[in-house]
Image (cartoon, rainbow, N blue to C red):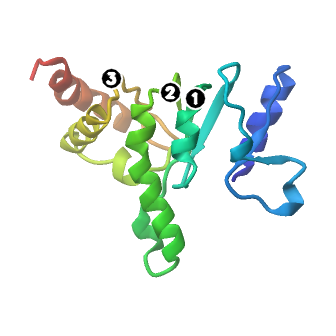
Amino acid sequence: MTNSLFLVQRILRGLGYESEIFVEHRDSRLSDVLFLVDDLPDHSDYVLIVHHSMGHGALDFILSLDARKILMYHNVTPPHFFAGISERHQHLCETGRSQINAIVAARPDLYLAASAFNIDHAYGTYETAVDYVEQLQDAGVDEVMCIMQMGTVPHEVCIETLRQWGEHVIPRFRGDA
């Protein structure tokens, strides 16, 4: 549960939409602002934004609902970051990463990335990019959008990245390689 959910809720409500937040676990002090995921309605008259940032036990239930779905991917921290620090969080990250394929297979109506951080996906050689796009393709993804300029990435690096994608990555998936 992050403050970004409250921000999305404020924005949606400000635009005139009803918006509630459903969670798997909640502190009793938040029972007036957070609802339990088991109480999600089972009909198709709403859009469900699935905020995925760690593994959880409610995913199968959520994916089985008739509602249209938007995946808001808020990055799953690489599990090794928690090695020796928190076995629980390491397990949640491992679970979250393993659940991504199931989410993609459920074919949400829209995918949103809420975090630019994912070192082992975002950086490397063009071979690294090809390997990652192949993983996405195996999971059922048929369109990839890349943000080449983030934060303080120099213009020259962005141009070189575009060149590498244009020469090596895109042709591989168009069948030109």
Q: Which mark is residue 148?
A: none
Which residue is drawn at the image coordinates 79% and 46% (left, top)?
A: 35
Element carrying mark 3: loop
Q: Earlier in the sequence, mark 2 or mark 3?
A: 2
Real-space Cα separation, disc 2 to disc 3, in angstroms: 13 Å
Front-lying residue, 78 or 61? 61
Residue 114 visible in image: no
The answer to whether residue 9 is left or right of residue 134 is right
| Circles 1 and 2: CB atoms closer than 8 Å | yes
Residue 6 visible in image: yes
Return the x and y of residue 101 as percentages of the image width and height.
38, 41
Return the x and y of residue 61 as percentages of the image width and height.
56, 42
The answer to whether residue 13 is left or right of residue 151 is right
Residue identified by numbered label 2? 108
Q: Point out the frontmost of discs 2 and 3.
A: 2
Residue identified by numbered label 3? 142
Crowd class of label 2 (few under 14; some 14 to 19; many from 20; radius 10 Å): some
Q: Amino acid at mark 3?
A: Asp
Q: Which mark is residue 70?
A: 1
Crowd class of label 3 (few under 14; some 14 to 19; many from 20; radius 10 Å): few
Q: Amino acid at mark 1?
A: Ile
Which residue is drawn at the image coordinates 53% and 46% (left, top)?
A: 59
Crowd class of label 1 (few under 14; some 14 to 19; many from 20; radius 10 Å): some
Q: Earlier in the sequence, mark 3 or mark 1?
A: 1
Q: How many marks?
A: 3
* Rendered position, 71 above or below 59: above
Real-space Cα separation, disc 1 to disc 2, in angstroms: 5 Å
Return the x and y of residue 63 as percentages of the image width and height.
53, 36
Q: Amino acid at mark 2?
A: Pro
Kindly give the residue lying farthest to the left in the view shown: 177
